Image: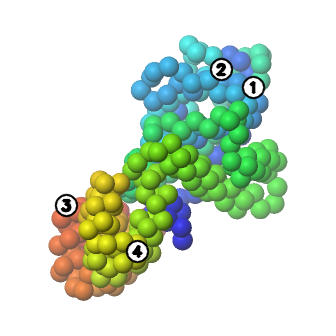
Amino acid sequence: MDLIGDVLASMRSGAPLSSRCRLQAPWGMRFAPVMGVGFHVLLQGSAWLVPPGGGDPLRLQVGDIVFVSHGRGHALVDSPGAIEYEVPPDAQGDVPEDLAIPNGSGAPTTLLCGSYIFGDRRPHPLITALPEVIHLPARIGPDPAIRSVVDLLGAELADRGAGSSAAVPALLDLLLLYVLRGWFEQQARTGAGGWAAALNDLSIRNALQHIQNEPAEPWTVATLADRAGMSRATFARRFSSLLGESPLGYLTWWRMTRAGQLLTLTDDSMAAIASQVGYQSEFAFGKAFKREFAVAPGAYRRQRRTPGR
């Protein structure tokens, strides 16, 4: 699995939510905070995004895509200052087809709205590195792959035929993946550091991929540097300067993240989970886990058990 896809899979909690809605001016919608990422795609008309925490509204035109990266409350309105009606919190960022948002008889606007729910799993640093709002204006020519997914998604939501229940979540997954990949690539071209530079650095990306694909391996800085094709000192310095974390610090973080997933989603024994994340004994694993989460693995499993298991 590729690096960004692996990160998203580690955070996902249930299928993404989406719907297509048509409103006539004047109208306004306020979205409650969600545990994840919210998105909106403007298919017809115009709108304004009132960003989290207020600030200057952002004008959206046909074809624009906007992501609210950290799930904070925000609003969409037909014009600045319009009355904002709350989208029900139990919609979790989704806009139900029959949502009773008061609107008028003016110019129509058609939107795709939805969210990706990450649940209570701790966010990956790649996600926390994102800006509050990612705006992809149509006028600067979004990636053709993104445009194709948006077109397919709009068609599926407008006319839900056989298989839509499978097609829509798959298309939403692709949309999120393409948007994140495109944003990080764009940031790398501008000379940005951090995760954008790390993903664009073949050596560092290779090391990250090995950590995420093979957390059970007995990695050291030397063996990771070897996979990266760099000297130990150069690798450690480069990794830390880009990601603000040492290679072994990130390795431990990822191992504990994977352990949390396994505890929540599987019935694997403690010994099996310890082995899968690189610990030779349950005792060593339990000690490391408690240091990271401030709770023992068994208690963590009981607290966060998937409903119905």
Check whether the beta carbons of the residues at disc 2 and disc 3 lie within 8 A of each other.
no
Label 1, residues with CA under 10 Å away: few <14, some 14-19, many ≥20: some
> What is the CA distance from the residue labelled 1 to the residue labelled 2?
9 Å
> Which residue is tagged 3?
294
Instruction: Pick the residue in front: 206 or 285.
Output: 206
Of all residues, the one furthest to the top in this rendering is 81
> What is the CA distance from the residue labelled 4 to the residue labelled 1?
51 Å
Where is 42 relative to 206, above or below?
above
Report the quarter where the N terminus lies: bottom right
> Which residue is tagged 2?
78
Q: Position of residue 94 (x, y in %)?
A: 59, 42
Please tell me whether mark 2 sits on a helix, a strand or a loop.
Answer: loop
Asked whether, in this view, residue 220 is left or right of residue 144, the answer is left
**Is residue 61 something that shows in the picture?**
yes
Q: What residue type is labelled 2?
A: Asp
> What is the CA distance from the residue labelled 2 to the residue labelled 4?
53 Å
> Which residue is tagged 4?
229
**Is residue 32 something that shows in the picture?**
no
Check whether the beta carbons of the residues at disc 1 and disc 2 lie within 8 A of each other.
yes
Where is 166 relative to 46, above or below?
below
Label 2, residues with CA under 10 Å away: few <14, some 14-19, many ≥20: many
Where is 138 relative to 116, above or below?
above
N-terminal of the pair, mark 4 or mark 1, is 1
N-terminal of the pair, mark 1 or mark 3, is 1
Please tell me whether mark 1 sits on a helix, a strand or a loop.
Answer: loop
Check whether the beta carbons of the residues at disc 2 and disc 4 lie within 8 A of each other.
no
